[in-house]
Image: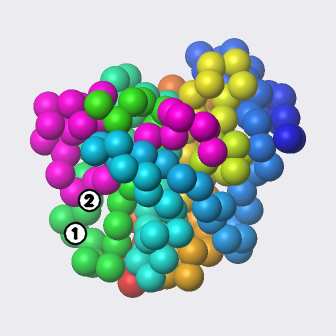
Amino acid sequence: MDARPNAVTLHGNPLTLLGSEIKIGQKLPDAELLNNDLKPVRLSDYKGKIVVVSVVPSLDTPVCDMQTRRFNSEAANLSQDVTILTISMDLPFAQKRWCGAAGVDRVTTLSDHRAAAFGEAAGLLIKELRLLARAVLVVDREGVVRYYQLVKEVGEEPNYDTALSAVKELV
């Protein structure tokens, strides 16, 4: 497995990402995740939809909270053909609790906690923390990545405007 030292930082401290970095134009790597009911879900299940994949370290942190709430509120302005996923290493129970408390009902949260299959396949698994790096991907109906932003400082928010523009270009 590829190791990419100094790929991201947290509070300025360099961190290593495991896996090959995703490139625009490649297929989104398929992975099995768990939904909030502990049922397996594959990313390939979303083929035919435009998918925003919002990747966060943990919903129980301020920036991840803001990022997920922002995409939840933006979902109201998007086509029914658009699905927004938030993927983290949080347990499905924690994701379900957080969504209920935050009133998040337009974003589907998926957990990569069991095998870190998505994190490794997408090159977003932080070696030192076994958390996912912050990133946003926009995937077309055929499962091809059309937009990708790896947030270099894990404690910062992504560029929502460019991600949403990429979504609107695909609708």
Residue 80: quadrant of the picture: bottom left
Q: Would residue 71 appear left or right of 49 to someone viewing this image?
A: left
What numbered label is drawn on residue 60? none
Could you give the CA–CA distance between mark 2 and mark 1, rounded to whole angstroms? 6 Å
Residue 114 position in % (x across, y down): 53, 34
Q: Would residue 151 appear left or right of 84 to someone viewing this image?
A: right
**Direction front: furthest residue:** 39
- Which region is colored magenta? 94-117
Residue 91: quadrant of the picture: top left
Residue 22 position in % (x across, y down): 72, 57
- Work out whether residue 106 or residue 10 is closer to the camera in this orientation and state it: 106
What numbered label is drawn on residue 74? 2
Residue, x 36% and y 50% (percent of image)?
Answer: 39
Disc 1 crowd, CA 10 A, few/some/many (<14, 14-19, 20+): few
Residue, x 51% and y 40% (percent of image)?
Answer: 112
CB within 8 Å, label 2 to label 1: yes
Q: Is residue 23 among the parts visible in the rendering?
A: yes
Query: Is 126 situated above or below 39?
Result: above
Magenta region includes residue 107:
yes
**Residue hosting label 1:** 77
